Amino acid sequence: MARGSNAILVGRGGHGEATLPGALGWAHGRGPLAAVAGAFTLAQLALVHPSMGLGWDETVYVSQVGTQAPAAFFSAPRARGVSVLVAPIASWSTSTTLLRVYLALLAGAALYLALHTWRGLFPAGVLATAGALFASLWVTLFYAPQAMPNYWVAIGALVCVGCFLRARSDRQDRRALWGVAAGAALMALMRPTDAAWVALPLLVVAIRQWRLALALVAGLASGAVAWVIEAFVSHGGLFERLSEASRIQGGLGWHNAVDDQLRSLVGRTLCRPCTVDMPNPAVTLWWFVLPLLAALGLAVAVRAGRTARTLVPLLCATTAAVPYLFLIEYAAPRFLLPAYALLAVPVADALRHLVTAPSGRWRPVLPTLLAVGLAGHLAVQYVVLERVVERTTADRRDWTRSAAELHRLGVRPPCLLTGHEAIPVAYYTGCSSGAIRGHNANTTKADILRTARTIPVAALTPPGGTPPGYARTWQTHRLDGLDVHIAPGPV
């Protein structure tokens, strides 16, 4: 294997690979990766319109550093990484369009850098194909420009595993060690528990290479330190925070959520409870083909004598998926983004083998079948994405309209909202949000009534819903999709 940070590999990988200098090296090395990253960025901007409003979870993350509304309650499972990510824009601008463009550009650049860390492990064509496969999934396109952590865990996983494999094969590659630490830190900053699951196989593999293990542990620790400190400051300790996070997730334990994940592939961004019918097989077919191609990629790697570089990402993808397939009782497609990113590399290697290996009469047949299959796959992903964006945009426009109606009714900042969908509606209105029970409990009935004496307070319910006991005498206004019960004016 060619060594060094500037080595660009061509051919099939493994043995006898050549390097290409100068402009020719760029064309055969970084050029395809840059093209994939650029196309990914443009696709985000074109297919997930930057004007799409912020979602529920996004309002929580953005409000921690933004100026539009007071910080929403930050529950135990969340980490501060997304707030750090959006701070350069959200700390001074309330423009959702500007934030989306910033995140799309950042996501494209991050994909390029993550794929580039795998140089020397697979040919540039395989890496570019892997990037295209991952970037063309509707769930990747939809969540990359959003203020959500899962895409960034996936990027951190790609960086960490790619650099881990480079450092493991070349103990003099110090840049790779720093890359291991950086990727692990990014994962842990975004979602510490996800980072632990991804890193588990790496810790086992690195047990005899103390520098590699140290870089990995140091990265995980540096990314998670803020989350751990906050656990002791605000949640009573680390184990208490983990226990509370488990409770919010419905209680971690044996739960077969594989069928829930399949149901969510039709575009259900959150399937909880997941009682919808199974989607058309055309929507889920790629999900069953994915592990088969990954297994073929492993077989190809074993035969070529380069098992580790394929087996390690497969193991990390498996451990990344385990908690979301078997330990929680609901599904969200974004949870599996790190697994999809890691699987993309061996799958791309398997596709290259299918295109180049056959001889005789099969040589023109398989590439044609693959082209047709990939075209159909892309069509399905586009259709699902279009529907998800349309539905999501409509939902967030409803919150905008509700905020405008609340302003018309006199509920203006400073103000407090509680009840049904209080967190996102409060963000759009510029209010604080409060709850006396549930996952986001952060106040009491007495505090709400006391607040109502000084600023506007409203309790939200679904249409025709019964307001909480303390708000049953408050004036009710029926909005489109929401009932608002407004406390008597401040005294």
Image (spheres, helix red, strand yellow):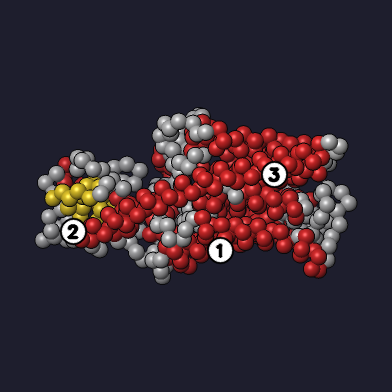
Quick check: 118 left or right of 102?
Answer: right
**Residue 482 location, x and y as percent?**
25, 47
Write the residue at 61% across / 38% down. 286
Quick check: 154 left or right of 350?
Answer: left
- Residue 409: which disc? 2
Q: Amino acid at mark 1?
A: Leu
Q: CA distance from mark 1 to mark 3?
A: 29 Å
- Give the mark, 1 or 3, whose residue is nearer the N terminus: 1
Furthest-bottom residue in this view: 92
Residue under circle 3? Answer: 371
Viewer-nearest residue: 177 or 228: 177
Q: Amino acid at mark 3?
A: Ala
Quick check: 254 left or right of 470?
Answer: right
Q: Amino acid at mark 2?
A: Leu
Write the residue at 61% across / 59% down. 39
Viewer-nearest residue: 405 or 315: 405
**Residue 318 location, x and y as percent?**
62, 38
Residue under circle 1? Answer: 105
Q: CA distance from mark 1 to mark 2?
A: 39 Å
Residue 179: image quadrant is: bottom right
SS class, disc 3: helix
- Give the mark, 1 or 2, whose residue is nearer the N terminus: 1
